[in-house]
Structures are given as C-alpha cells and as structure tokens.
Amino acid sequence: MIKLNEQKVVFDWKRRNSLKALCFSMIFVLSLLLSGFNTAYAATSSNWQIIALAPFDQEMKLSTPSAAAPGGRGFMTPQKVCILNSNGGPVINTPVTFEVSSNVLITSLMRGTYSRSITVYTDSNGIATAANTHADFLGEGFQVYSQYAGIKQTLQVTASVPGLNKVTFNVVVKTYGYQY
C-alpha cells in the first residue's frame, strides 16, 4: 500500500475577497476603456462623457402568448450607461432618461407607469440602469408584448442626459411563433 503525502490547505478568505474585488474592478475599468474606443457607443460633451455599458445589442424571444397578446410577452435586459467627468471620474446623481422607440407591431412600456420612458439617477459609480423603480416591479426592464405572432422587429432604447449626445441600444424582438 502506497501512502501519499497529505498537505493541509489553509483557505484565506481575505485574500480571496481581495482578489475578487480586484478582478471586478479591472473588468469594470476595461469595459469603460474598451467602450470608449467605439464611437458608436460613446457620446461626449466638452466636460462629460456617456458610455453604454451593456447590453449594446440585445435579442429577445417573446413567450407566454395570451388572448390579449398572441405574440407573447417578455422583458428587456435593463440597459446601462456610465457618466464620467472630464477627469474620468463618475458623475453622481445625474438624471438619465431611457426611452424605447414606438412600433406599431410591438409594444414596450415600463410596468406601473405605462410609459415608454423612465428617468433614473446615476449611482455612486456614475452608472444608470433602465430598471423599473415602481414599488411593485422593482428592477424589471421594459416589458415587451405584441398582438402579432411570428414576426421580428427591432426596437431602439435611447439613453439621454441633458447637454450630452444620446446613446442608442438595439433590441431585436422575435414574437411567439417566429421560426428563425
């Protein structure tokens, strides 16, 4: 019988958490830097910059058709932008309005307010998210539904800040029964 050397491994939680925080910080900084190189996703003014974080392009398939919405229902993944000042630091507590384009075949609204737009404020990292702020629907993205089954349409969600250029996200919507 062969006996293997046994080693006791001590797991250092502080080191693990520090490494995790470092990795997340690096990913955030890289996403900001990489987004800044793509002018389609960054808009600037003389002092501030608005950068689209995610999702730039989104594809969704509606499900759960009903008599009221034969084309199905679904929710967008909430879009995110970051507002930076001229030094690259976050701009805090700034209003950002997200608005989804109108479409005759696809309806998209924020539940609770039944509006195609929502205004939210940037957090301590300068990030604003198109997530519902209504108490009954916190965190949801725009609700999407259609009375038409088997179609494909593209919606646009525009993020705007007074004094800055707008940033646009594309959302491809495939209704229930779409074959491709």
Image: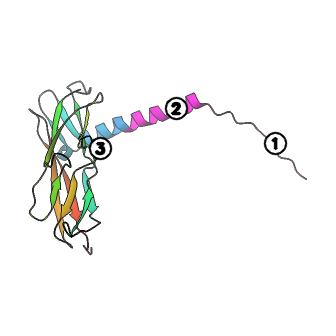
Q: Which mark is residue 17?
A: 2
Residue at numbered disc 1: 5
Q: Secondary structure at mark 3?
A: loop
The quadrant in which residue 13 appears is top right
User: Which badge, 3 or 1, is on the more N-terminal residue?
Assistant: 1
Residue at 18% from the left image edge and 71% from the top image edge = 151
Apparent side of residue 33 relative to residue 165 in the rendered image (left or right): right
Labels 3, 2: front one: 3
Labels 1, 2: front one: 2
The quadrant the C terminus occupies is: bottom left
* Residue 141 sits above or below residue 97 on the image: below
Residue 87 colored magenta? Answer: no
The quadrant in which residue 48 appears is top left
- Which amino acid type corresponds to the residue marked 1 in the rendered image? Asn
Q: Secondary structure at mark 2?
A: helix
Residue 5 colored magenta? Answer: yes
Q: CA distance from mark 3 to mark 2?
A: 26 Å
Q: CA distance from mark 3 to mark 1?
A: 52 Å
Apparent side of residue 10 relative to residue 22 in the rendered image (left or right): right
* Label 2 Cα crowd, 10 Å radius (few <14 / some 14-19 / many 20+): few
- Which amino acid type corresponds to the residue marked 3 in the rendered image? Gly
Direction top: furthest residue: 87
- Which amino acid type corresponds to the residue marked 2 in the rendered image? Asn
Residue at 12% from the left image edge and 65% from the top image edge = 105
Answer yes or no: do the residues labelled 3 and 2 have beta carbons within 8 Å? Answer: no
* Label 1 Cα crowd, 10 Å radius (few <14 / some 14-19 / many 20+): few
